[in-house]
């Protein structure tokens, strides 16, 4: 069975987040916002739809708007994509992910773009 990044995040003993907002700890662990987002609880259309803030769980590109979509496949976050690991390597890949500063920087870019997309979607909903 293939597990998504949020599923792996919830089960990973190596995921430690910082209470210091958007700043990095000296040891290079990601911020609490990254941890929040990779668990799938960020400003994603799929999550906002589940909470009834959006009418659809889809990204503006038409695909399901979840964390995996923005990290691996959305055409709007292409410059920030990470290479998707094979199913049998996902757990090791994820456990090493958060110590890789370049990967975390890419995720921050993808999630920043995603936040802008969700802002647009919620504004469009509010104007209807």
Image (cartoon, rainbow, N blue to C red):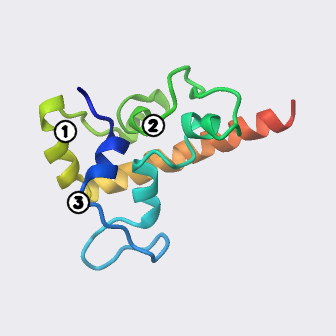
Task: Check the image and name the residue furthest to the right.
Answer: 128
Please tell me which residue is depicted at 34% across the width and 38% down the height of the picture. Answer: 81
Graded by Cα atoms within 10 Å as few (under 14), some (14 to 19) or many (20 or more), the crowding at tag 1 reads: some
Q: Position of residue 6 (x, y in %)?
A: 37, 44
Q: Secondary structure at mark 1?
A: helix
47 with respect to 99 (left or right): right
Mark 2: secondary structure: helix
Tell which tag, 3 or 1, sits nearer the viewer.
3
- Residue that mark 3 sits on: 13
The one of 52 and 24 positioned closer to us in this rendering: 52
Q: Is residue 86 visible?
A: no
Which of the two discs, 2 and 1, sits closer to the camera? Answer: 1
Residue drawn at point x = 52 percent, y = 31 percent = 65
Tell me where residue 74 sits by quadrant.
Answer: top left
Q: Which residue is mark 1?
A: 90
Residue drawn at x 42%, y 32% as measured from the top left: 69
- Considering only vertical position in the picture, is 92 above or below 69? below
Q: Earlier in the sequence, mark 2 or mark 1?
A: 2
- Whether the residues at callouts 2 and 1 have beta carbons within 8 Å, the answer is no
The answer to which quarter of the image holds residue 86 is top left
Q: The N terminus is located in which quarter?
A: top left
Answer with the quarter of the image where residue 85 lies: top left
N-term mark: 3 or 2 = 3
- Mark 3 element type: loop
Location of mark 2 (residue): 77
Above or below — where is 79 with respect to 59?
A: below
């Amino acid at each position: 069975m293939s597990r998504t990044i949020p599923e792996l995040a919830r089960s990973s003993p190596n995921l430690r987040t910082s209470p210091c907002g958007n700043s990095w700890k000296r040891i290079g662990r990601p911020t609490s916002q990254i941890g929040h987002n990779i668990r799938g609880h960020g400003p994603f259309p799929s999550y906002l739809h589940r909470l009834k803030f959006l009418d659809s769980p889809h990204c503006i590109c038409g695909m399901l708007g979840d964390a995996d979509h923005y990290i691996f496949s959305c055409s709007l976050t292409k410059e920030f994509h990470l290479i998707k690991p094979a199913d049998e390597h996902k757990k090791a890949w994820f456990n090493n992910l958060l110590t890789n500063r370049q990967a975390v920087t890419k995720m921050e870019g993808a999630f920043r773009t995603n936040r802008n997309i969700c802002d647009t979607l919620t504004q469009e909903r509010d104007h209807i």
